[in-house]
Structure formats: C-alpha cells, structure tokens
C-alpha cells in the first residue's frame, strides 16, 4: 500500500514522526509536509507565489519533502508532482491538538485530508488532544489500530480521528460521533505596540457543547472519536427555504 | 439594520467599495476587512501572532477597520471587539472571482461568512466571476436585489451568491443550486530559482463538472447562483458505514 503522509505542524514536528513510525508497518510512505508550523491554516492554498520544495532528512526518522506552503498545498503538489504513483491513502497528522467541532474548519490537518478527498483518494486526519507533553507515540499506536479496522472499507471523504489526552489515563473506548457544530468561547487580549498600533491576540477557544452526542463531547469524556466528514457544504434544509422564495 | 461588511481581496479592493455603495441603502455598515489581499486564505485564522487593527478611510467610499489577518480573523475581531452592537447580518465580498464548487473551501470570502454563521448571525458571501474588468458596480446592484428578497427569511448558515460574467451579457436569470463537489483540473509549472531550489507555481484550476445541476454549471451558463451552505461537515452516509464496523 502506498501512503502519502502530511501534517500541519510542519515536517519537523514530533507528531508526523510518530505517525511515520507506525504507518511504515503497513505501507510505503511518501512524506510531503509544510516546512513551517501551519496551525490554523484551514484550507488555505498558495495562489500568487511559487512553492519551494526541498528534499529533507529528519534525523532518525524519514526522508521526505518540505514545502513552503499550507497543508493543502502539500497534498496538491504531492499528488501532481512528487508521489511516484497515486497513493492508496492519504494520512494527515498527528496534529498537536484536537480537531473536533468547528475546529475542523480552522484545521490544516483536516484540510490536507479533505484536499485528498477532492481527488477521490481515501483520507484520514489524525489529531491528539493538546497536552504539555502530548504522548504522540501512544497516540500513533492507537491511530494505527483504528486505521487497520477502517482499511477494508471503501472510505468516503475524510475519516477524522481524534485521540484523547493520554497522560493520565488510557482511552475509555472509541465512539463514532458526528461533528459538533457549536461555536467557541473565545476573546481577544488588547494591547498596543511601540508604534501606537492596536494589537489583538486571540485567546480562549473553549468549545461550547451541549448534551448531544458529538466529537467534542466524546473526546473530552476520554474516548477516541471517529467521524466521517464530507465536502458537500450544501445545506439541503436551507435549500428548501430558498426554493420557496420568488426571485 | 446593522451590517458587518468584510471581504478577502483586502479593504482597498473595488469589490468591497461597490458592495458598500449598494448596502448603505439598506443599513448601517461597519467595514472590517483584511489590510492585504487574502485570496485563497480559506478558513485560516491567526493564532500565534496578534492582529494589527487600524482605522482607515478609503477615499470617496468609506471609513473602516483594516486588520492584518485573514477574512475569518476580521469577522471574529469585528464581532468581539469592533462592532458597536451585534450585526443583524454579515456580508462578505464582492470577491473578484467566483466561489462555486469546491472553491468554497479555498475561499476567504465564504470563510468570513461561515465564521459569522458559527456565531449564529445570518451571513451572505458575494462573488463575481473573474474578468479582466469585472463589473463590480452592476454585480453589486444584482447582489442587493437578491439580498432584499432573502432578508424576510430566517437564513440558516451562509447564503452563497455568485454573479456571472457581465461584460458581454446580462444574467440569464437566477438559479437556486447545490454546491458542485467535483474537483479541478489543475497543474504546477516547475522552475528553479538562482539558489537552485525547485519552485512550483499552481496553474489551471478549471472546474470539472457533470450534467448535474450545480452552482458551477449554472454560473458558467450565465445565471446568478444562490446556494445555502451549512457547517456540519459530517457525512451521514459515511457515518452509517462506520457504525457497521467493529472497533
């Protein structure tokens, strides 16, 4: 099996090295990842400038390609220029921090997987809950266990896998749960710089949630979460309302 | 009515000035837009650095706030810090270039509207087909006609409005159509810089489409398109497959 591996924390991040170490047991891996940390990149792509691509070796881990762009850029470039053959699967991660709820929109990790899905290639996004010392090694081991169960199935779109915090306890189990659509509680910290300009630093970002079963809730309860994400944003209930209007 | 107006082409772009000129007829507008051109920004947000926010006057048009970030950053900051009261509606655009099909994922214009939807504020994304001299003035007039028809309705999520090329003909009419999920035909142009690094410039980007009714098809046929977009990415058919697995 040919695997394309990417991430959004950058090619030097510990999460992608941990993912590589496990995934190499089940396939041939091509690594194409951002040269820099791209957290919050969402589904941004580089349109006005060329991408710089360099072959790099990460000591004690892998040789891959670093790209001066976003996670989605990496997948586009890998599929069109770098991968020797079309990958059977694209894996993105392991991200340092969960990607559940509306975070899937801000997430470069999910966007990279979604980009592969645009090309009709099965794609998996891997994220581990943010801790001071996130245990990427065990997060990768749990991730591989889930991926091996998924592989016999024809996967539609993106499978979004999140591993709960592992420093204090093992996962309580695994839940297949929908994406939460609740927002965040967040705010800005306002300061001024020496030039007298007003600066705002984003802070907070706690997920609001309700009692409905969701990825956000299940993850915070200590479960591994697995969610199927698609890329038809059409809101069909909304469409019904629009069809009733006289334009 | 209080309107928050933003875009992704930057606060100096002609599209936002054209939108302002029409929208001011129906409400009080606060403009908060990126200081720079942010095409392809997707739903990226700025997490590691503070945003610089400055009050600016665009000669002959409006006084607003420029923000050193993405379109989604602008909406977050506007809602939490800048708008005097919660806006009744958020409008993003008019973008220079259509945002149909999977382009809605790459689009900062749509992302800004989606960010407002996360806050449960009705949101509208406006885009005009890319031409050498896109007719933003008439695109804005058509946009306002559509918005006025939409306003009595409780809008869910984002209403994505695209105006076809106007230089050669008027729109053939208006179609309420779902988002196309087909991909692009695109490629990279490979070069080298003086330092011997390999560079790749993204090129192409023609929408693939089939005969199914969609935003992509209707727009290229010369119709104004209106699409309801939601923010639950969960693929419920995919979820059924996942529920059948034994994890």
Image (spheres, coloured by chain):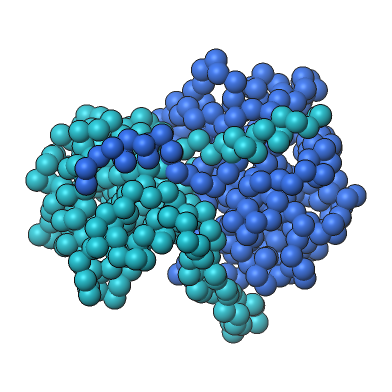
Chain colours: A cyan, B blue
Q: Residue furthest front?
A: A211
Count of labels in the image: 0
Q: Quadrant of the N terminus of chain B?
A: bottom right
Residue B206 higher or lower than A108, as above or below: above
Displayed quadrant of residue B131 = top right
Closest to the observer, A247 or A28: A247
In this rendering, position of residue A138 left or right of residue B112: left
**Can residue B99 be seen from the camera position used here?**
no
| Residue at x-position 80% and y-position 36% | B146
Closest to the observer, B246 or B207: B246
Residue B159 place in picture, x, y as percent: 68, 41
Displayed quadrant of residue A245 = top right
Closest to the observer, B68 or B74: B74
Residue A35 higher or lower than A28, as above or below: below
| Residue at x-position 54% and y-position 39% | A233
Displayed quadrant of residue A91 = top left
Closest to the observer, B21 or A167: A167
**Can residue B64 be seen from the camera position used here?**
yes
| Residue at x-position 54% and y-position 47% | B231
Residue B210 higher or lower than B117, as above or below: above
Residue A138 higher or lower than A124, as above or below: below
| Residue at x-position 45% and y-position 26% | B185
Residue A43 place in picture, x, y as percent: 46, 47
Residue A28 place in picture, x, y as percent: 13, 39
Residue A48 place in picture, x, y as percent: 51, 44
């Amino acid at each position: 099996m040919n695997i394309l591996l990417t991430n959004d924390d950058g090619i030097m991040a510990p999460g992608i090295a941990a993912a590589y170490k496990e995934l190499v047991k089940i396939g041939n891996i091509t690594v194409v990842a951002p040269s820099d940390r791209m957290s919050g990149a969402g589904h941004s792509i580089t349109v006005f400038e060329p991408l710089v691509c360099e072959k790099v070796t990460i000591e004690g881990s892998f040789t891959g390609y670093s790209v001066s762009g976003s996670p989605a850029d990496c997948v586009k470039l890998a599929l069109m220029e770098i991968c020797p053959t079309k990958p059977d699967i694209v894996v993105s991660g392991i991200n340092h921090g969960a990607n559940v709820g509306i975070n899937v929109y801000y997430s470069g990790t999910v966007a990279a997987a979604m980009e592969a899905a645009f090309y009709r290639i099965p794609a998996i996004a891997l994220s581990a809950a943010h801790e001071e010392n996130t245990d990427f090694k065990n997060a990768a081991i749990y991730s591989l266990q889930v991926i091996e169960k998924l592989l016999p199935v024809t996967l539609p779109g993106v499978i979004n896998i999140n591993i709960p915090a592992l420093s204090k306890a093992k996962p309580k189990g695994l839940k297949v749960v929908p994406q939460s659509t609740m927002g965040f509680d967040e705010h800005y910290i306002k300061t001024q710089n020496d030039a007298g300009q007003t600066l705002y630093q984003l802070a907070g970002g706690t997920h609001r949630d309700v009692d409905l079963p969701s990825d956000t809730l299940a993850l915070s309860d200590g479960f591994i979460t697995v969610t199927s994400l698609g890329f038809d944003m059409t809101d069909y209930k909304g469409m019904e309302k629009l069809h009733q209007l006289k334009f």
